[in-house]
Amino acid sequence: MSIFIFAVVFGLSLCADCFAVSLCSSVTLKVIRWKDVTKVALGFAFIQSLFLLLGWAFGGLFVGLVEKVAHIIGFLLLLYVGGSMLVEGVKGMKGGEVEVRDLNGWRNIILGGIATSIDALAVGISLSMDSMTWTDVMPLVISVFVVTALSVICGIWGGKTIGSKVGDISEIIGGLVLIFIGLNILL
C-alpha cells in the first residue's frame, strides 16, 4: 500500500468521531456562514493533529496516563456536550426558551475537539512505540488535519440539513448520539 493511501485511510479512521460530533452539534443551526464552518473545521483539525503529534512526541511519558484516564475524559466531555443538547432539545419541545448549542463558540470547539482527539493521542503514542520517525509521522499528521477538516465541513452541512427536515427532535437525537459515543468510549 502506498504511503498516500495509507495516510488517507489513517486520517479517515481518526476523523469519524469529529464527523459525528459536528453532525450532531449542527442540527440546530439555522444559518451557516463559511467563516464559522472554517473556524470549526480548522479548530477540530488542529486539535486532532496536535494530539496525534503530542502522542508521538511524548509517547513514553503518556502511556500510563492515557491508558488509565483517556476513556473517562472522553466520556465526560461528550456527556457534557450531549447532555446539554438533550436538555435544550427537551426545553424546545416543551416550548421553553432554548439556548442553541452549536460549535460556533471557541469553548464548544475546544471541548468537542478535545473529546474527539483523545484517541488521536493514544494512536500517536502507539506510533511512538512503533519507533516511527518524524518523516514517517508527518504525512499522517497532515492527512489527519486535512481529512478531519473535510469531515467536519461535511458534518456541519449534513447536520443543518437533518435539523431543517426533522426539527426540534433533532437536537435530542444529536444529544443522545453524543452520549452514546461517550458511553462507547467508556465501555
Image: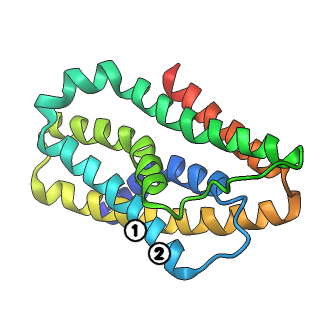
Tell me residue 84's x, y (percent): 63, 40
Dividing the picture into quarters, in which one does residue 5 lie?
A: bottom left
Decide if residue 1 is in sight here: no
Instruction: Return the residue nearer the eye: 26 or 92.
Output: 92
Tell me residue 103's x, y (percent): 54, 59
Q: Label 2, secondary structure: give it.
A: helix
Residue in the image at 47% along x and 65% along y: 40
* Amino acid residing under circle 2: Thr
Residue in the image at 12% along x and 45% along y: 57
Residue tagged by mark 2? 38
Are dots 2 and 1 in contact, CB under 8 Å? yes
Tell me residue 33's x, y (percent): 59, 80
Residue tagged by mark 1? 42
Tell me residue 66's x, y (percent): 28, 27
Q: Which mark is residue 64?
A: none
Q: Is residue 114 left or right of residue 27?
A: left
- 181 lies above or below 102: above
Residue in the image at 66% along x and 51% along y: 24
Q: Is residue 64 left or right of residue 1?
A: left
Decide if residue 141 is in sight here: yes
